Amino acid sequence: MNVINRLQLFNFSKINIRKIQSNATLVDNCQNVHNRNPRNLEYLRIAHRPHGYHLERKIPSYWHKLTLTRSIKYVTFEVEHFENGVVLSASTKEWPIKKRLYRCQDSAAYINLGRVLAQRCLESGILFVHADPDLPDCEKTNLALQQLINEGISLSEPLRYIHPNPWDINRPEKPWEIHEN
């Protein structure tokens, strides 16, 4: 391909780019919309949430669950999705975290793991996490959970929106509608 053909292709692509100037023309030219976010229904609170069986002692009713794994030397916090397993994790095994800590099991390690996990959750769009009731109730774990709350992560997931029947008295507000005063 010679230089003239390349220039013609380059100029042609610039002309096509300049034709579309605003978002309104983009929307008018759009034929299909493909949602590439697999968690969209969870954010709208209409996705299926597992309920388990009524005879089970612990009913797993969450989209994302926070779990803690302790070993002799290290601590790991993980956010698990009910279908896909571990989505996010923060651990004192990770070198960037480990090199800034004095010890991998002290209170400062738990606080910093809470900060790092909260930042990763916010970057990935996870705002609500179900705190596992099996988390040990100790001071260090409470420090990490408090740090998650301070950074903006809620430790309880909102209720699932269930479409009301026409004869229902109570009609919950739809989570996707915005009411401005």
Image: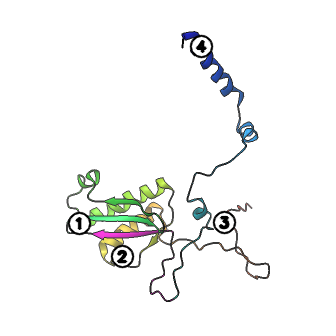
Q: Tell me the SS state at disc 3.
A: loop
Q: Position of residue 57 (x, y in %)?
A: 45, 87
* Location of mark 3 (residue): 175
Q: Cα distance, mark 2 to mark 4?
A: 65 Å
Q: How is the image coloured?
A: rainbow
Does label 1 or label 2 sit earlier along the sequence? 1
Crowding at mark 3 (Cα within 10 Å: few <14, some 14-19, many 20+): few
Q: Are marks 2 and 4 in contact (CB under 8 Å)?
A: no
How packed is label 4: few (under 14 Cα within 10 Å), some, or many (20 or more)? few
Residue 57, magenta (yes or no): yes
**Mark 1 vs mark 4: in front:** 4
Q: How many angstroms separate mark 1 from mark 2 (CA)? A: 16 Å
Task: Tell me the residue that label 1 is attached to.
Answer: 105
Is 61 included in the stretch rendered in magenta?
A: yes
Query: Outermost residue, front direction?
Result: 1
29 shown above or below 68:
above
Report the amino acid beneath label 3. Pro
Percent position (x, y) of residue 68? 34, 70
- The residue to which callout 4 is attached is 5
Q: Closer to the N terminus: mark 3 or mark 2?
A: 2
Helix, strand, or loop for circle 1? loop
Which amino acid type corresponds to the residue marked 1 in the rendered image? Gln
Q: What amino acid type should be assigned to the residue bearing mark 2? A: Leu
Q: Quadrant of residue 174?
A: bottom right
- Find residue 31 and report its horizontal and vertical position in percent: 73, 43
Q: How far apart in space, not on screen, are marks 1 and 4 (Cα)?
A: 64 Å
Q: Bounds of the magenta span?
A: 55-71
The residue drawn where x is 60% and y is 19% is: 10
| Whole-percent x, y for residue 92 in the image | 27, 59
Q: How crowded is the residue under tag 2: few (<14 C-alpha within 10 Å), some, or many (20+)?
A: few
Residue on which the image places disc 2:
135
- Is the residue under label 4 in contact with that under label 1 (CB below 8 Å)? no
